[in-house]
Amino acid sequence: MGAGAAVALTLTVALVSTACGSSSVARSVHRSAPTTSASTTTAPTTTVPSAVPTTVPSPVVPTVGWAHPATTLPPAGGYTGVSCISGVFCVSVGGGANEADVSDSTGPGVVNAWDGAIWGTQSVYYPQPPGGAATAPELAGIACTSGPLCAVVDGSGHTSLGDGTNWSAPAALAAAPAAPANPADPGPDHQGARSAAVDCPTGQFCAYVDNTGHVAVLRGTSWSVPQVMTTRVGSATVGLYQSGRVGMSCTGTTACTALVGDTVLDWDGSTWTGSPAPWPASLTGDSAVSCPVAGACVAVRGPYVSVRIGGSGWSTPRSIDPDGHLDAVSCPTLAFCMAVDAYGDVVHLADGTWSSPAKVVPTPSEYAGDGTSLSCPSDQFCMVLTGDGDYATYQGPDPNAPVTTATSPVVAP
């Protein structure tokens, strides 16, 4: 990190307590009017395992603050996202076609809401496609904000709006202009080849990105026509492509940042612009970003973290999980971040220092390809959820305890 960035990062706890409006790392989809009808699963097929959880949580030693280190959400198959707006309201999304579904079939897209103690009855936001064809939903993402309003999106370009239980019928985004195919893109018929992310800083605005560089925004209940972002490969201009999960984070209706591979996409309220990500182009793996306040973002990919503050640019990537594969990051304040990898290990930023990786949920086995999801609506609460449905919750320190004003940079140099 340059000297200017290091100075910019040296902020006090008292000055960096602004929370993110929506702190999950998600993917995107679209829809028209919000939820009107609720439907529940009967016995979700193929993609969704049987009524008996197939993952047997193994004993783990939680890090300080992790209250439920190894519990299992009712089975639905291939959980790919979670979003929390408080310690008593989280919504998970899963089912459908997903990377780890070796049967190459598609079940319904399902959601579960959590009330701080238990998971509620499963709801179907996307009916099972006729014949079980592996079309949609694919690697769905979710973002919730107060209201509650939740947006579910997936890599097939479908979106749905709801409140955690009731959901609008899934609708496809408008067709985007064609762009020359990226030579790295194997096409939509390959498992895991399509994913999307979404974030909703308000109940009237959401932003969407998929892993082929399509971006769109939701205003009210209407999604814009997707715009196709491009990059250069050799002498050719092609569409973006990244295998696996991508990231989106918004601090308001005029400030969003998305990550697609080695490209950063920024929204200023009217226009999307692209710039190089801090990673080398050869780096592979999922990518995720969390922006706690306007102008400040924390991004992860592979074992690395990088920070951008204002006009300082991205810091040099720093390895914080040498043996891991970081899937998600959530930073409700500039002084507090969590990141989680594909093996259920969490790294925690506090007092300017990243902790060593610590296991809080069992390593996924049945749905190991779907990634691990994370949402921290505040520095007092986080939830981690694996593709298998194992989850853990983090409780922060006593919010009424005395607060010091010692310097706490976002990330140590």
Image: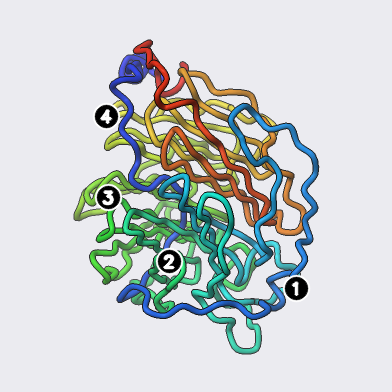
Q: Residue at x 41, y 30 (%)?
A: 307
Looking at marks 2 and 1 on the same chain, the residue that comes earlier in the sequence is marked by: 1
Name which residue type carries label 1: Ser
Ranked by sequence position, the earlier of labels 4 and 1 is: 1
Estimate the spatial distance between the alpha carbons at disc 2 and disc 3, rounded to whole Å.
Answer: 23 Å
What number of labels is visible?
A: 4
Q: Nearer the viewer, mark 3 or mark 1?
A: 1
Q: What element carries label 2?
A: loop
Disc 4/disc 1 C-alpha distance (Å): 48 Å
Residue drawn where x is 43% and y is 39% of the image: 277
Report if the CB atoms under discs 2 and 1 are less than 8 Å apart: no
User: Disc 3 to disc 1, how far (Cα)?
Assistant: 39 Å
Amino acid type, callout 3:
Trp
Going by the numbered disc 2, the residue's amino acid type is Pro
Residue in the foreground of this view, choosing between 162 and 28: 162
Instruction: First in sequence, mark 4 or 3: give its number.
Output: 3
Judge whether 186 appears above or below 136 on screen: above
* Residue under pointer 4: 311
Q: Is residue 347 above or below residue 139?
A: above
Above or below, comparing residue 204 to residue 25 in the picture: below
Sequence-earlier tag: 2 or 3: 2
Dot in front, 4 or 1: 1
Q: Nearer the viewer, residue 124 or 211?
A: 124
Marks 3 and 1, the one that precedes in the sequence? 1
